[in-house]
Image (cartoon, helix red, strand yellow):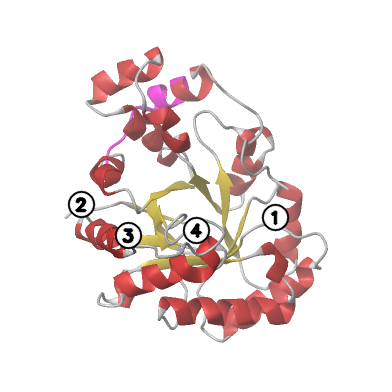
Amino acid sequence: MSNIPTKKLNNGFEMPVLGFGTWEMGGRFEREDNYDESNDIQAIKKTIELGGSRFDTAEMYAKGYSEEILGKALNEYDRSKLFITSKVTATNLGYDSVISSCKASLARLQMDYLDLYLIHAPNPDIPIEETMRAFDYLKDQGLIKNIGVCNFNVERLMEAQNQTKNKIVLNQVHYNLIFREPIKKGVVEYCQNNDIFIEAWRPVQQGSLAKKGIDIVDKLCEKYNKTPAQIAINWLVSQKNVITLVKASNIKHLEEDIGAVGWSMSDEDVLLLTNNYPIQLDRSNAVQLK
């Protein structure tokens, strides 16, 4: 079994640097008819066999079906050894809706608590005070252990933190070698300076960063005996407070993904990639920071 390293914030909150996402399990935004969930369940079990323990899902993934699949796959394992994250949809950020969404997610997952509960995206039409008050209630009730957000810019992150008595421990954002919006907009620096995890989704940009042909990466692959995808993932987790998320459903890439962590590039090579990677874009092509 592989040993996926963890990172720890100053307040003691600790997370494995590599998590496994469930987007597209059971469908995308709708539940897919006649969906064969057996492959996903097998992939989740294989992930645990290889040393994975942190899984990420959301109520909006296949309208909750992704949570159901994850719950079925995990119900035979020791809950205390797992780290489970789910997210409340932006339209459900009113006080009562947050609480009912969380309880519904827990029911689908067949679990008593979430290790981390995230706001999936900001919603300027619902007061953030109302949302954070609901998150505080959920934490007080023991239904969630920690609080986080997704796709928040610095201003919104500060505003959310001001409205909760608990610490926001994580901001999940689109960040990789190509897409640098979190750097450009100061989110990475702010989180590093304020003891918050940055969780990078799409670390290999849907396979774009898994291909050979970029000279600077190819040389590092040879130097470290790693694949381009492993270099791309390791570049992320080499940075202070940065962790990442790969897809749990892709069995053939699981060993490669897990092999991306637990070793280190030199500081010089990390900096080389940061400064000299040839394609760098300042805005996400998927979800911009708001």
Indicate whether residue 180 is drawn in magenta: no
Among the 4 quarters of the image, the one containing residue 219: top left
Q: How many numbered marks does the figure carry?
A: 4
Q: What is the residue that sits farthest to the top in this orientation?
A: 215
**Secondary structure under badge 4?**
loop
Graded by Cα atoms within 10 Å as few (under 14), some (14 to 19) or many (20 or more), the crowding at tag 2 reads: some
Locate residue 61, reporting x and y percent.
Answer: 52, 61
- Residue extent of the magenta highlight: 261-272
Q: Is residue 18 left or right of residue 10?
A: left
| Circle nearer the viewer, 1 or 3 | 3
Q: Earlier in the sequence, mark 2 or mark 3?
A: 2
Q: Earlier in the sequence, mark 2 or mark 4?
A: 2
Q: Residue at x 26, y 49 (%)?
A: 251
Graded by Cα atoms within 10 Å as few (under 14), some (14 to 19) or many (20 or more), the crowding at tag 4 reads: few
Residue 157 numbered tag? 1
**Secondary structure under badge 1?**
helix
Say which of 254 and 262 sits in front: 254
| Circle nearer the viewer, 2 or 3 | 3
